Image (cartoon, rainbow, N blue to C red):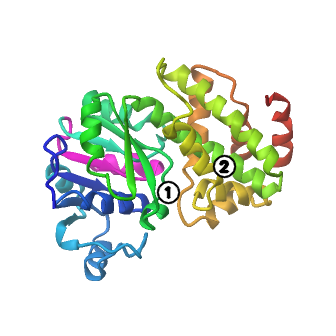
Amino acid sequence: MPSPLKSAGRVAVIGSGSWATALAKLLLGNCDRIGWFVHRQDRIDEFVRYGHNPVYLSDVAFDTMRIDFTSDINEACDGADTLLFVVPSPYFKDTADRISADISGKNIVSAVKGIVPDSNMIISDYMRSRFGCREENMLVIGGPCHAEEVALERLSYLTIGCRDVEKAAAFASLLDGKKMKTIVSADVDGIEYAAVLKNVYAIAAGILHGMKAGDNFLAMTVCNAVREMARFVDAVSPAPDRDICRSAYLGDLLVTAYSRFSRNHNFGAMIGKGYSVKAAMMEMEMVAEGYFGTKCIHQINTAGPAVDMPILDCVYDILYRNAAPRRAVEAITGSFT
């Protein structure tokens, strides 16, 4: 069993949902031990007793002797060099507010794929502002990769972003495996914003699916969503060498818009079938982060770049202004090219 690379050091996972569980399993393929913060002690006790996460991806077996569980987030932070945050964005701030340990010099890896509500900041910006974390120590995980397919050991690809691409490569090697391939990138901000937007567009795709709008129109919507994503990301974080067709952007959008594993797609589909937003949210077993991301991106765009984003505006009107889905969709069809 290889030891963790020195540049990553000891890794602690912060979060215990399906994506956290999948990433922890990948890490244990390359690390002797990991730390793992799970906020409820009874969940830890069940995890250790049965050898699997009692709530998420329960078919995935773990060697719990190689995991240092804790329900104290500061213990997890103090004992690690690299902190992997895998918390739904609506709960991220509450989780971060529990940290009193000095994490300013640690490597921070975000697999959150969302924006911090109220602050409207991507995770890397929030961690720099809130904890004084260094830009060169901020990493982000992106790419078309559902936790469920990782658990099923289906071939998948992840992109690891960091300003320091050598550090990105070092952390990427901790996730590499027979069925997991990794790509490195320096575009931290672009990957983070794209990860938020793909959830918004997945809700739009789900709404169309629920309305039985057809594959032709869905394809047209996704095609326009890619260009809309490019306009926004290039406006808020210019990067001349960014290729929106790469897997961290387009790939993540496609898998989230079309897959049956996509909670955002499924959330949108319920709305398209006639569920109210409130009823659809109550029906969901897990958080559809695109609901929160829609509001955050809409506010950012309204206050800042004000780029043309008809699909985002359509989803916002449906989710937050009680617009009828069919009418809202029909209103933007003339803008498609």
Quarter of the image with the N terminus is bottom left
Q: In x, y percent, where is residue 316?
A: 69, 40
Q: Earlier in the sequence, mark 2 or mark 1?
A: 1
Give the labeled residue for mark 1: 146
Disc 2 residue type (three-letter) = Ile
Crowd around label 2: few <14 · some 14–19 · many ≥20 (10 Å): many
Give how far across and how far down residue 158 sits, in percent. Answer: 41, 46
Amino acid at circle 1: His
Q: Is residue 331 left or right of residue 52?
A: right
Residue of label 2: 203
Residue span colored magenta: 81-104
- Residue sitting nearer the eye, 250 or 237: 250
Q: Residue 40's quadrant in the figure?
A: bottom left
Helix, strand or loop at disc 2?
Answer: helix
Which numbered disc covers residue 15? none
Q: Nearer the viewer, residue 2 or 315?
A: 2
Is residue 247 in view?
yes
Q: CA distance from mark 2 to mark 1?
A: 16 Å
Please name whichever residue, 56 or 187, is drawn nearer the observer in this view of the structure.
187
Residue placed furthest toward the front? 178
Residue at screen point 25% across, 47% down: 83
Residue at image x 24%, y 55%? 73
- Judged from this view, the residue extending furthest toward the bottom is 49
Residue at left offset 64%, top offset 48%: 202
Estimate the x, y position of residue 65 in percent, counting from the top left.
17, 72
Place residue 172 in its image quadrant. Answer: top left
Residue 232 location, x and y as percent? 59, 26
| Image quadrant containing the C terminus | top right
- Residue 94 among magenta residues: yes
Q: Is residue 24 above or below residue 64?
A: above
